[in-house]
Amino acid sequence: MQKVIIKFQNGEEKSGEIMLFNMNQQVLQFYEYKDGGEKESRMVRMDTVKAILFLKREETYGSHLRTETIEKSVYAGTLAFRIVVEFNDGEIMSGSTLKYNPNDKGFFLVPLNPADKSERIYINAQAVKNVDCKRLLGKILVDQKKITQEQLVESLKCQHEKREKKIGTILKENSIITQSQLEESLKKQKEKSKMLGEILLEAGYITQEQLEKALKIQQENKKKKLGQVLVELKYITPNDICIALATQFNKHWIDMTNLDIPESVVKSIPIELIKKFEIIPVDKKPDSTIIIASSTPNDDEIKSELSKLENIKTELVFAYEGYIESAINKYFLQPA
């Protein structure tokens, strides 16, 4: 049985469980949760459904939650399409999908936000007003005829089982593409020289007018970074920044909202590096790799300095700079 939340087109939401799901069926057997913990079986007409949220299984909620969800966000980011769905009632959902056809009855979306409670979301096409799709690495490789659709599906299946590996690495290891082909495709997927504003603008998170206003404010207050200005103006959320950058650069990211970092982790690298580069350790993987949050994890100088640490393996991930600053103040600058 899979735990789900069903959103209906009339605005209702019901929690419960389903056993089997087929988007082509006309009715769905749904075991709705009732007061007292009991379940009541009912038949749900699929044409009344807006979306079905398939919740993450309980065993994924544990001491390694953040590590798991970081990897899931990258898995989502390497599917064929980056997709933004606008429902008839105005709600917006964003994520990625392997396949989208406007003529299908419905489609699945994988949330990009690692803090999302859903593992995947079924969306009824009848409840949708507009869908915006952008190609991601897997789709680019297929379109360039570097790989077939079947090879992409098999590689994504393999990646789902080995979350620590990126789709390009798996394709290369299985001799489906060469290193030069991978690099060529990645160049088309990302432009490292792009500034944050350009990335957010191209991804549709902000308008040109909003970007210009934020840049003007930033010029008047040099101490503030563009991302912080955009968040303060309420044009975007901190997670919007992370999702856009992680997708653009095919990197992991982490939601640091209300994050409680163990003392053994937060003090695992020298304070000098933390203050110099505005980075902070946030978690430790089972293999003892220290996950370090940074607003610029692609910075070669940061990578170089971390590589010099003896007997310490590190992995840089995207995080919102405002949350990083708050965490540094909390763990290192407050009086004892």
Image: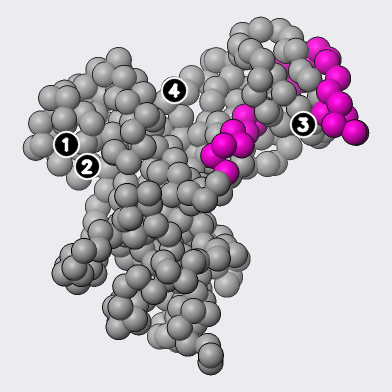
Q: Position of residue 216 (x, y in %)?
A: 45, 78
> Tag 3 or tag 4, which sits nearer the N-term?
3
**Placement of the N terminus among the 4 image quadrants:** top right
* Location of mark 2 (residue): 186
Which of labels 3 and 2 is toward the front?
A: 3
| Circle 4 Cα neighbour tier, 10 Å, few/some/many (<14 / 14–19 / ≥20) | few
* Location of mark 4 (residue): 99
Q: Who is closer to the viewer here, 8 or 293?
A: 293
Mark 4 touches mark 2? (CB < 8 Å): no
* Location of mark 1 (residue): 182
Q: Name the kind of residue labelled 4 in the image.
A: Lys
Residue 219 left/right relative to 147: right
Residue shown at the point (13%, 25%) measured from the top left: 175
How far apart marks 4 and 2 lie (CA) works out to: 20 Å
Q: Name the kind of residue labelled 1 in the image.
A: Leu
* Location of mark 3 (residue): 15
Mark 1 touches mark 2? (CB < 8 Å): yes
| Circle 3 Cα neighbour tier, 10 Å, few/some/many (<14 / 14–19 / ≥20) | some
